[in-house]
Amino acid sequence: MSGHNKWSTIKRKKEANDAKRSKMFTKIIKDITIAVREGGPDPNSNPRLRLAIANARGVNMPKDNIQRAINKANEKDSANYVEIVYEGYATHGVAIIVECATDNQQRTVANIRSYFNKHGGSLSTSGSLNFIFDQKGVFRINKEKISNFDEFMLEAIDAGAEDVVEDDDMVIIFTPRENFGTMQKTLEKLNIEADSSKLERIPNTFVKLDKDQALKILKLIDLLEDDDDVQEVYHNMELPDEILDEIEG
């Protein structure tokens, strides 16, 4: 549970900055495009598209933008994105997983490798970091959407939640990967729309660094996150309190 709390704090404060970037919309549009290509443009029969739309609303994407993305993705000449994951180590043994959606794998791998190399890191083979990260369903919900927290907690546990964390104005639910869909259906039954719902890679061990060491690795993470092909970046670095305070501020 302590690991979940630590991860939720890092992600929560990081997302506060990410949500201010227009790049967040680009990520969502890619999610919508992939969902439509896989299961069609009707969210009623396409669970992945329903999830992408809910996440779009969670970052305040206008309805017109969402519909435009769906329409464009349904066109024959829409971009054909491939989802691919890269794994590697930064300095001081910090593990990093990079999830990408790209229409040019050669470009993407060349860019990702160059970022690691320039910052003293290196790419690893696929699956080599599986022992460090557990893939969990993570649902972030504004507390204002929950009228009775105790009843909600019981419903969440019945749906397979393994942890429920309160973090400022948010409630964060963690589920095993296999219970992700069940939790989605439970929230729909309760008429509660999560601000974000997705499978995330949560570290089960953390590397503790001092401020200077952490700042150097954050430069690599920023480079990765700024790449247009990158959707998510996960790491197992325990950020010093002074850095978390700066991110929150």
Image (tube, rainbow, N blue to C red):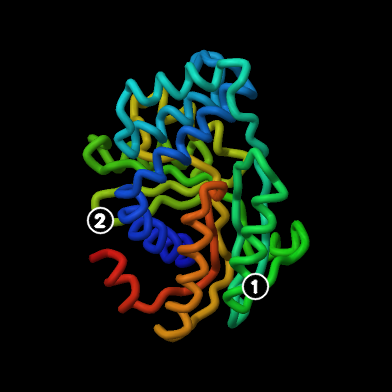
User: How many residues crowd around disc 1 within 10 Å: few (fewer than 14), some, or many (20 or more)?
Assistant: some
Residue extending furthest right?
A: 125
In the depicted view, which residue is nearer to us: 220 or 129? 220
How many angstroms separate mark 2 from mark 1 (CA)? Answer: 38 Å
- The residue sitting at 60% across, 56% down in the picture is 98
Q: Label 1 is placed on what type of residue?
A: Asn
Find residue 40 and name its label: none
Q: Quadrant of residue 113?
A: bottom right
Which residue carries the number 1 mark?
Answer: 117
Relative to the observer, which residue lies in front, 183 or 224? Answer: 224
C-beta proximity under 8 Å, tags 2 and 1: no
Q: Residue at x 22, y 39 (%)?
A: 144
Residue 57 appears left or right of 7: left
Q: Earlier in the sequence, mark 2 or mark 1?
A: 1
The image quarter in which residue 36 lies: top right
Amino acid type, callout 2: Asp
Badge nearest the viewer, 2 or 1: 1
Q: Eyeballing the image, is 42 above or below 88?
A: above
* Count of residue discs: 2
Q: Secondary structure at mark 1?
A: helix
Picture quarter with the C terminus: bottom left
User: Would residue 166 be visible to someone looking at this image?
Assistant: no
The answer to which of 150 and 23 lies nearer the viewer is 23
Residue 73 percent across, percent down from the top left: 54, 22
Say above or below: 145 vs 20: above
Q: Where does label 2 land, which residue?
A: 168
Q: Horizontal and vertical percent for residue 42? A: 51, 13
Alpha-carbon neighbours of circle 2 within 10 Å: few (<14), some, or many (≥20)? few
